[in-house]
Image (cartoon, rainbow, N blue to C red):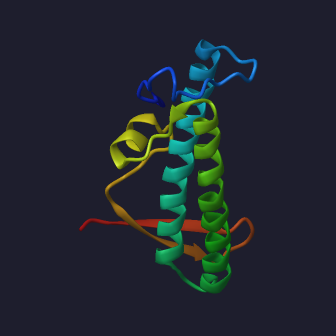
Amino acid sequence: QATKEPAMSKSTALKIDNGISAKDRKKLADGRAALLADTYTLYLKTHNFHWNVTGPMFNSLHTMFMTQYTDLWTSLDEIAERIRALDHFAPGSGAQFAALSSVLSSSLTYRYTLLPAAPPFILRVRTIRY
């Protein structure tokens, strides 16, 4: 959940006046905080796929995952800045992201192999416990 910025003295506080009420800004910030958490969790999972893909399609998948995690990483800053523009702080810890994210996370490491077969291709997931 996005958090409200600590109170400042009336002489130094900047008042947000963008036509959106404080209550509605809070709702918008909370929604964007959940989006930020989902995006960050998906970024981590996609990076994991990039690191651990194996098989005959390695180069294609490795490149595809890199493109995806780069796009996700770029969007994180924009989402967080939109939360700040609503006069709230963006979540930034693993614990906050875990609590807010709807993307399932796991402490397991996965190895992904795309098996060439008759279309559609089959993605085999093997769980590796460390």
Q: Position of residue 56 (x, y in %)?
A: 61, 86
Q: On the rendered structure, is 112 left or right of 95?
A: right
In the rendered view, tell whether residue 1 sits above or below residue 120.
above
In the rendered view, tell whether residue 20 sits above or below residue 128.
above
Which residue: 61% across, 23% down? 15
Q: On the rendered structure, is 93 left or right of 102?
A: left
Which residue: 43% across, 46% down? 92
Q: Nearer the viewer, residue 94 or 22?
A: 22
Q: Position of residue 89 (x, y in %)?
A: 49, 36
Q: Residue furthest left?
A: 130
Q: Position of residue 11 (x, y in %)?
A: 52, 24
Looking at the figure, which quarter contains the C terminus? bottom left
Q: On the rendered structure, is 63 left or right of 1?
A: right
Q: On the rendered structure, is 41 left or right of 69?
A: left
Which residue: 39% across, 42% down? 98
Which residue: 33% across, 43% down? 95
Q: Nearer the viewer, residue 42 or 72?
A: 72
Q: Position of residue 9 (x, y in %)?
A: 44, 23
